[in-house]
Amino acid sequence: MTLCFRDGRAAILAATLALLPVTVVAGDDGDWQQWSEAFWSQNLGSGFDAAMRFESRWEEDASRWAYYEVEPMVNWRYSPRWDFSLGYERDERLVPLEEIAHVPNIAATVKIPRQPWQFPPVLDWRLSNRMRMEFIVPEDPQMDWQPLYRNRTDWEAKWRWGSKEIVPFAFEEWFLNFDRGEITQNRFGVGIGVPIVPHAMARLYWMRLDEKRGDRWEWHPVVGVQLQFQF
């Protein structure tokens, strides 16, 4: 069966439904954090990309390196509106306890291609929604594995003044833990990207991270930096 849209209405509906969870919940204040990410992608031809992602996190008011993850993946651009990916993520928490988890995952992304807005400065925007299923397998044999569903909606634009370009963006992602039968995390962020050299972009963002711990919610302000390389 071929998956396609005759127009953007179904894609808009999918993205709207993805935003139904409340992005801001009442919760206790937590420490602020700093996240850093490097992402590299190489076009292999025939619609396939090989990619590698590394992310590290400083927690406890950005005073301690607490966590990192490494994820190689393969992406397939099936059509202008659909991408599919297969990946493996290795997570390691350093504090307060040392924990390692292996996270195989599969994802599908529906996209609305860039649309021009006809007023200056020129602004092209794109909307996408990623549906990702992952299986968290702790290295500790006494801990059970957990199925987790993640749904992320991204909006970004290209804003140009003559030869200069900036990329404002926003995102929202919620996590559904099947073992607990409830949403256990939500991320909402806004930021801006700036091309630095050909094939490379630096992105800076602020994010509100809400996490459910036991029967209560805790939220963290996060400042993030991303470096993206695409060839």
Image (spheres, rainbow, N blue to C red):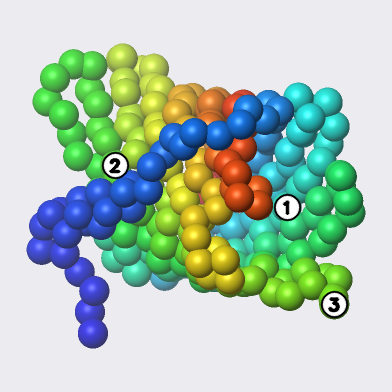
> Does residue 63 appear left or right of residue 118 in this picture?
right
Circle 2 residues within 10 Å: few <14, some 14–19, many ≥20: some
How far is mark 1 from mark 2, CA to CA? 27 Å
Q: Are marks 1 and 2 in contact (CB under 8 Å)?
A: no
Q: Are marks 1 and 3 in contact (CB under 8 Å)?
A: no
Residue at image coords 23%, 16%: 121
Which of the labelled discs sits on residue 141, or is there none?
Answer: 3
How far is mark 3 from mark 2, CA to CA? 43 Å
Looking at this view, name the residue that lies furthest to the front: 215
The residue wearing badge 1 is: 69
> Does residue 212 appear left or right of residue 33 in this picture?
left
Percent of width and height locating residue 71 = 67, 59
Which image quarter: residue 222? top right
Residue at image coords 81%, 51%: 93
Which image quarter: residue 98? bottom right
Circle 1 residues within 10 Å: few <14, some 14–19, many ≥20: some
Report the front residue among 175 and 100: 175
The residue wearing badge 2 is: 126
Give the secondary structure at mark 2. strand
Report the front residue among 216 and 52: 216
Give the secondary structure at mark 3. loop
